[in-house]
Image (cartoon, grey):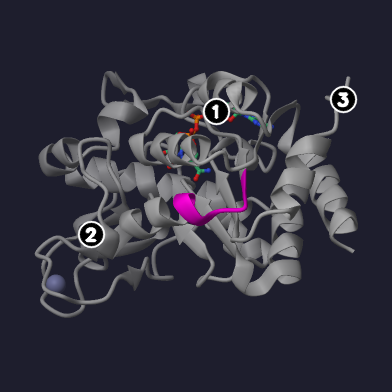
Amino acid sequence: MSAPAPTAAIAAARARRGPIVVLTGAGISAESGIPTFRGTEGYWRIGSRNYHPQELATFAAFTAIPAEVWGWYLYRRGICRAAEPNAAHRALATLEQAHADDFVLITQNVDGLHLRAGNSSERTWQIHGNLHWFRCTADCGAARQPVPDALPLAWERGRIPTGGEIDLLRCANCGAAGRPHVLWFDECYDENNYRADSALLLARQAALLLVVGTSGSTTLPLRIAQIAAERQVPTIVVDLEPGVFGELAGRSRFGAFLAGKASEQVPALVQRWLSAST
Ligand code: NAD
Ligand code: ZN
C-alpha cells in the first residue's frame, strides 16, 4: 500500500530558499543487490571466526589483520562493480540535473552507485568514502588513488590478497601501505576526507531534506537530521521502516515519512517535486 503524498512538506520546501539536500544510506542500494550491514549476508568469516562488519570495518582490525580486511573490501568492490544503479539512484541524478547548483547529495554509501547513475562528483559528498579508492596510511599528502585495475574485480568471497597484490595497494608517492578510503567505525569524521563540516553547514541552509534508506546508526547523518529539525527544514524520509529519521520527520511540522522501497518511492517523489516546480 502506498503512503500518503507529502504535500505539505513539498509546499513548505518550495516556499524556502536554499539547496535541496538528499541523504542516502545502504537501503537505496539494497535493490541493486548490495547487502546492507544489518542482514546476515553482512557477516564475514575469516578462518574459524565470524566477524560482524562493525568489528571488521575498523582501524583496529586493519592494524591487526590488514590483508584479511583488504580481502573483505576487494570482495565488496567486486559486488559493487557488478551491481547496477536502480531507479532510485537514477531519479536522484534527474533531481540534480533539474537543480544544478542548488543540490547536494550526501551519501553514506561507499559503493559509487550514485556517481555511476549520473550524479556529479562535485555535488555527491561521500561522507564515508568510496571503496573504489585507497589512500596512504602515512598521510604523506598524496591524493587518494583508485584501486588498480590489475586487481581482479571478481574477488572470491574469503580470498586473502597475496603479498604481490597488497604491493599494488601501496602509496604511489611514498611507498607506505595503502588503506581503503572509507571511514571506519572507530574513526572520526573530518572535513578533508569526508566533508563533515561542510555537511553540517549545509543542514542549516537546506530548503528540503530528503532521507533515503538509512537507519541512523552513525553520528553525522543523525546530526544533519537533528539540525534540519531544529530549523524546521521540511524533511521527507523514505524507508521500509520509520526508524529514527522517520520518527524525527513525524514530529516535525513539515515532515513526512514514506514507507516503502526506495526504487518505488523515490522516483514517484522526484516526479511530484519536479511537477510542483513548473
Ligand atoms: P543500515 O544497514 O544501517 O540501514 C539500512 C536502512 O535501509 C534501514 O533503515 C532499512 O530499513 C532500509 N532499507 C533496506 N532496504 C530498503 C529499500 N529497498 N528501500 C528503502 N529502504 C530500505 O545502513 P546505513 O544507515 O547506511 O548504515 C550502514 C553503514 O554501513 C554506513 O556507514 C555505510 O557507509 C555502510 N554500508 C554501505 C553500503 C553501500 O555502500 N551500499 C552497504 C552496507 C553498509
Ligand atoms: Zn604516501
| Nearer to us in this view, 49 or 208 | 208
Disc 1: CA contacts within 10 A as few (<14), some (14-19) or many (>=20): many
The first of marks 3 and 2 along the sequence is 3
Q: Which residue is mark 2?
A: 166
164 left or right of 175 in image: right
Quote the CA–CA distance across marks 2 and 1. Answer: 40 Å
Q: Which residue is mark 1?
A: 245
Q: Is 14 part of what is drawn in magenta?
A: no
Q: Amino acid at mark 1?
A: Phe
Checking the image for residue 2, the label placed there is: 3
Disc 2: CA contacts within 10 A as few (<14), some (14-19) or many (>=20): some
Above or below for 143 versus 13: below
Percent coordinates x, y for residue 194 in the rendering: 33, 57
Q: Magenta residues, as a range?
A: 203-209
- Cβ atoms under marks 2 and 1 closer than 8 Å: no
Checking the image for residue 215, the label placed there is: none
Q: Residue at x 28, y 60 (%)?
A: 191
Percent coordinates x, y for residue 48 in the rendering: 27, 19
Disc 3: CA contacts within 10 A as few (<14), some (14-19) or many (>=20): few
Q: Amino acid at mark 2?
A: Ile
Q: Residue at x 70, y 68 (%)?
A: 99
The first of marks 1 and 3 along the sequence is 3
Question: Residue 30 is drawn in which quadrant?
Answer: top right
Q: Amino acid at mark 3?
A: Ser
Mark nearer the viewer, 2 or 1: 1
Question: Residue 115 is drawn in which quadrant?
Answer: bottom right
Where disc 3 sits, the SS reads loop
Where disc 2 sits, the SS reads helix
- Cβ atoms under marks 1 and 3 closer than 8 Å: no
Percent coordinates x, y for residue 39 in the rendering: 52, 22
- Cβ atoms under marks 3 and 2 closer than 8 Å: no
| Nearer to us in this view, 72 or 90 | 90
